[in-house]
Image (spheres, rainbow, N blue to C red):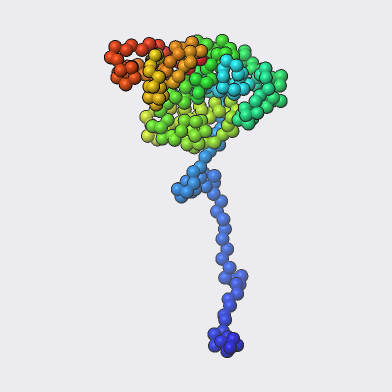
Amino acid sequence: MFSEQAARDPMVTRGTSKSTKVETHAIPMSEEDIVRHLSETGRYRILTKLVPRTVAPNPQPEFPLKGIILDTETTGLNARKDEIIEIGVIAFTFDATGNIGDVTGVYGGLQQPSVSIPPDITRLTGITDEMVAGQSIDIAALKALIEPADLVIAHNAGFDRPFCEAFSHLFSGKAWACSNSEIDWASRGYEGTKLGYLIGQAGYFHDGHRAVDDCFALLEVLAREAAGSVSTAFAELYEASQRSRVRIFAENSPFDMKDHLKTRGYRWSDGTDGRPKSWWIEVDEEALDDEFRYLRAEIYRYPDTDPPIKRLTAFDRFRA
């Protein structure tokens, strides 16, 4: 049966000869072409490795103000008993409208603590006891950068400032700003405030968790001119640092109101840090009357309640 079918429907095969062979030549694409091509497909998101700015030997004179971006790594979370094991500092210039000029100095140093570095800190930072053995932070190098600074910036100033002030008097009396809490990142299209999120959404990646590397990364995010934003994040931060804020202490508030206060953003102070033992919150000066109305109507339920307040500038904020 098969032979008869084969006779009726002979199989025809076509060989490939040199004369019919189609040769193709790859056209080399530049790196920029590859990036553009992948981006235009809509299926890829390209991150660029962050390249640290170089120190300018002759800073531009039109940027007269001096800023510091600072990051620390520590043995724990308590500035009263834990210690700094690494500090990274970048000095830069800027003008009164918040435009960033040049990087003018960089310092990164390790410090051997009085105790062994906890394993969880080593996992987080990559810093080991062997790395810090015999190391100490150069105070003179820090002084040359910190002393002339008009503004010190940390991405979690409430954490870094107490550690820095416990470490050296150099950091006392300085104006501080927090790039985490004093910038409305959500309005700029960012989905989170952690430095890793900000860097990634800004289109960069970097070697994280070392102090100087994180400082350079934060500088680029602050300086970035994003589409749709009328100013850079740094300009917003600098403007915020110029405003006075008010800390309100909800002293003697009813115990059963604690969840309401916490939901509204109040934090608890146990009195050991020099503050009153109470719930407290910081608000802009223009929001003070609204906050008093809330406390009087919703918490104390007494129209003449007059909670104590403390007015704060950048010289006072984020202290222990």
| Residue 128 placement: quadrant | top right
Q: Residue at x 61, y 18 (%)?
A: 83
Question: Which image quadrant: the N terminus?
Answer: bottom right
Q: Residue at x 41, y 13 (%)?
A: 312
**Vertical order, 206 against 97 (above or below):** below
Q: Is residue 94 left or right of residue 81?
A: left
**Nearer-the-camera pick, 108 or 258:** 258
Q: Is residue 255 left or right of residue 296?
A: right
**Where residue 15 sits: x, y (%)?**
60, 74
**Where residue 150 sits: x, y (%)?**
48, 15
Residue 310 in sight:
yes
**Where residue 77 sits: x, y (%)?**
56, 22
**Where residue 139 sits: x, y (%)?**
62, 13
**Nearer-the-camera pick, 44 or 122:** 122
Point out the residue furthest to the front here: 256
**Nearer-the-camera pick, 21 or 105:** 105
Q: Is residue 100 left or right of residue 118?
A: left
Point out the residue furthest to the left here: 303
- Number of numbered markers: 0
Q: Is residue 35 left or right of residue 98?
A: right
Residue 150 in sight:
no
Q: Residue at x 56, y 61 (%)?
A: 24
Q: Residue at x 58, y 68 (%)?
A: 21
